[in-house]
Image: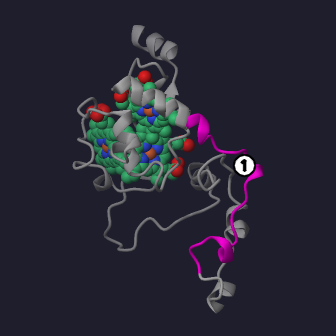
């Protein structure tokens, strides 16, 4: 079952591979199928192309690399509304999958905690203990685990190497030390 599913996945990845960034355009609001083209309010809104084209480019999703946008200072979203909110950032990286057919999966806390609160993930979605969760690519593709956000509000699942980012040889070398 698992092998069949993962083969399908590899094929899906080829089929849905994103076109190069420059081949794609942000749709005007009047043509995006979401906004009413007849609405007079449309003139008051900023067009996505005008806003997003100024941000660091990506090759997938909405074509903005949001991690770079934040790190470079291109955007500076407000971290909290209430002054008493405790904003927490965590810096460690956790290898959540080792020795598969693909490079190992590294989960970095930093880019996540710059956008999210710990409670978005802990303890319901993931137990906060390295190795305590059983991840599955199939579940992720079904919109669970990492797939709750990736493919929905964060970079899409077609970007395999952004999660599968640690080559097995490098991992082996690190473990021998
Ligand atoms: C959002 C992060 C993320 C993305 C993007 C992602 N994966 Fe995964 N993948 C994981 C995690 C976490 C696991 C660990 C679960 C496991 O070991 O079964 C995994 C496991 C796997 C496995 C089984 C273990 C292995 O390494 O052989 C395969 C195969 C796989 N992914 C293929 C892909 C392919 C192909 C893509 C791109 C189309 C992809 N993944 C994109 C997070 C991701
Ligand atoms: C986007 C989801 C997400 C967010 C947000 C998040 N974490 Fe995690 N956290 C994870 C994942 C995934 C793991 C790895 C679990 C595993 O290996 O099974 C983890 C692991 C941990 C661990 C275990 C580390 C270890 O070495 O055993 C701790 C502690 C932790 N998180 C605390 C936090 C705190 C504190 C915050 C907020 C500052 C936070 N996390 C925010 C997903 C998240
Ligand atoms: C609660 C939502 C959420 C969950 C769950 C989640 N992520 Fe993310 N992830 C984000 C957001 C938001 C970003 C930053 C925006 C972006 O890159 O699209 C991000 C960024 C990342 C990045 C950084 C890429 C870079 O450019 O530096 C990696 C790697 C990543 N996620 C892997 C994972 C893996 C692996 C899991 C599952 C173990 C996971 N994420 C679960 C929301 C989530």
Find residue 44 and report its horizontal and vertical position in percent: 66, 86
Can residue 87 be seen here?
Answer: yes
Residue shown at 73%/54% (left/top)? 24
Which residue sits furthest right? 22
Q: Is residue 61 left or right of residue 113?
A: right
Which residue is at the front of the view, 64 or 75?
64
Q: Is residue 23 magenta?
A: yes
In the image, taking residue 14 as reference, residue 19 lies left or right, namely right
The part of the chain drawn in magenta is 13-35
Q: Residues within 10 Å of mark 1 (few under 14, many from 20)?
A: some
Residue displayed at 70% across by 71% down: 28
Q: Is residue 112 left or right of residue 123?
A: right
The quadrant of the image that shows the C terminus is: top left
- In the image, residue 2 sits, relative to residue 57, either above or below, namely above
109 sits left or right of 35 in the view: left
Residue 142, given in percent of the width and then of the height, sits at: 37, 44
Q: Quadrant of the N terminus?
A: top left
Q: Residue at x 47, y 10 (%)?
A: 173
Q: Is residue 132 above or below residue 73?
A: above
Secondary structure type for disc 1: helix
Give the image quadrant in which the ligand numbered 2 is located. Answer: top left
- Is the shortest distance between ligand 3 and the CB of mark 1 under 8 Å? no
Name the magenta segment's main secondary structure.
Answer: loop
In the picture of the structure, the residue carrying the numbered disc 1 is 21
């Amino acid at each position: 079952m698992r092998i069949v599913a993962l083969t399908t996945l590899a094929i899906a990845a080829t089929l849905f591979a994103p076109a190069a960034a420059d081949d794609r355009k942000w749709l005007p609001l009047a043509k995006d199928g979401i906004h009413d083209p007849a609405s007079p309010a449309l003139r008051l809104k900023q067009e996505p192309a005008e806003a997003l084209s100024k941000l660091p480019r990506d090759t997938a999703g909405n074509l903005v690399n949001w991690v770079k946008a934040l790190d470079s200072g291109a955007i500076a979203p407000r971290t909290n509304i209430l002054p008493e909110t405790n904003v927490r950032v965590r810096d460690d990286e956790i290898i959540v999958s080792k020795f598969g057919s693909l490079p190992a999966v590294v989960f970095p806390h930093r880019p996540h905690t710059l956008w999210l609160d710990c409670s978005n993930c802990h303890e319901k979605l993931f137990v906060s203990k390295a190795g305590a969760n059983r991840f599955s690519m199939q579940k992720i593709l079904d919109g669970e685990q990492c797939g709750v956000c990736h493919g929905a509000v964060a970079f899409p699942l077609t970007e395999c190497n952004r999660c599968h980012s640690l080559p097995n040889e490098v991992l082996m070398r690190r473990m021998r030390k």
